[in-house]
């Protein structure tokens, strides 16, 4: 089974109208591509495709280097498959839009950031003997946290969204 459909982003526009095709992909498929497509589709029933099967088809075509376009759409139709239906089942929207991407995986939890921030603040207060940090000291601590966790200027240190 296919582990990921992320590699199918290049195939996203496959399931769209011919106007989204580019160069060679707008023409008909080569004999080799047609044979590959026929072989891939022979493993599935066009009338009872599941989401996972549609994702497998998209992935297999992508791995085979079959480009999106009118030729592919036509060949799929001739084989009894609806390219748009496969795209919809696979989670591929029109023109390759798949909705907003998920947030990037992060090995850093908010609690990690909060713990590190707390440690830095406590250490700075102990070092200065003061009960409050100056603006300069706060900026230094923010810079240390940003460096430690790879945060950009516009990134939040802690996600407070619900």
Image (tube, helix red, strand yellow):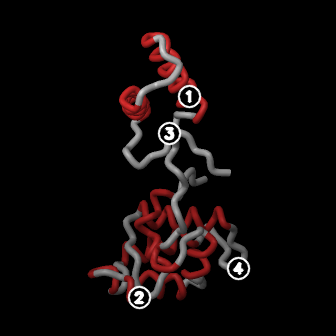
20 or 126, which lies in front?
126
Q: Which mark is residue 112?
A: 1
Residue 47 is marked as: 4
Q: What separation in Å lies between label 4 and label 1 (alpha carbons)? A: 50 Å
User: Which of the two discs, 3 and 4, labels the residue nearer the N terminus?
Assistant: 4
Q: Tell which tag, 3 or 2, sits nearer the viewer.
A: 3
In 3D space, how far apart are the residues under numbered discs 3 and 1 (Cα atoms)? Answer: 10 Å
Disc on the earlier residue, 3 or 1: 1
**Residue labelled with disc 3:** 157
Residue that numbered label 2 is attached to: 18
Which residue is drawn at the image coordinates 50% and 79% (left, top)? 15
Q: Quadrant of residue 46?
A: bottom right
Dot 3: few (<14), some (14–19), or many (≥20) neighbours within 10 Å?
Answer: some
Residue under the image location 50 percent in, 22 percent down = 121
Q: Nearer the viewer, mark 3 or mark 4?
A: 3
Tell which circle, 2 or 1, labels the residue nearer the N-terminal end. Answer: 2
Identity of the residue furthest to the left in this view: 23
In this rendering, which labeled residue sits more in front, label 2 or label 4?
Answer: 2
């Amino acid at each position: 089974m296919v582990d990921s459909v992320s590699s199918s982003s290049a195939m996203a526009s496959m399931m769209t109208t011919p106007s989204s095709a580019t160069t060679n992909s707008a023409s008909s498929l080569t004999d080799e591509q047609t044979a590959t497509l026929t072989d891939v589709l022979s493993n599935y029933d066009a009338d009872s495709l599941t989401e996972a099967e549609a994702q497998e088809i998209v992935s297999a075509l992508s791995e085979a280097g079959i480009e999106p376009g009118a030729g592919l759409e036509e060949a799929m139709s001739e084989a009894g498959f609806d390219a748009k239906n496969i795209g919809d089942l696979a989670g591929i929207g029109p023109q390759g839009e798949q909705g907003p991407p998920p947030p990037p995986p992060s090995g850093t939890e908010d609690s990690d950031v909060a713990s590190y921030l707390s440690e830095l603040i406590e250490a700075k207060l102990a070092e200065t003997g003061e009960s409050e940090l100056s603006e300069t000291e706060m900026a230094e601590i923010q810079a240390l946290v940003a460096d430690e966790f790879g945060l950009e200027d516009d990134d939040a240190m802690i996600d407070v969204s619900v």
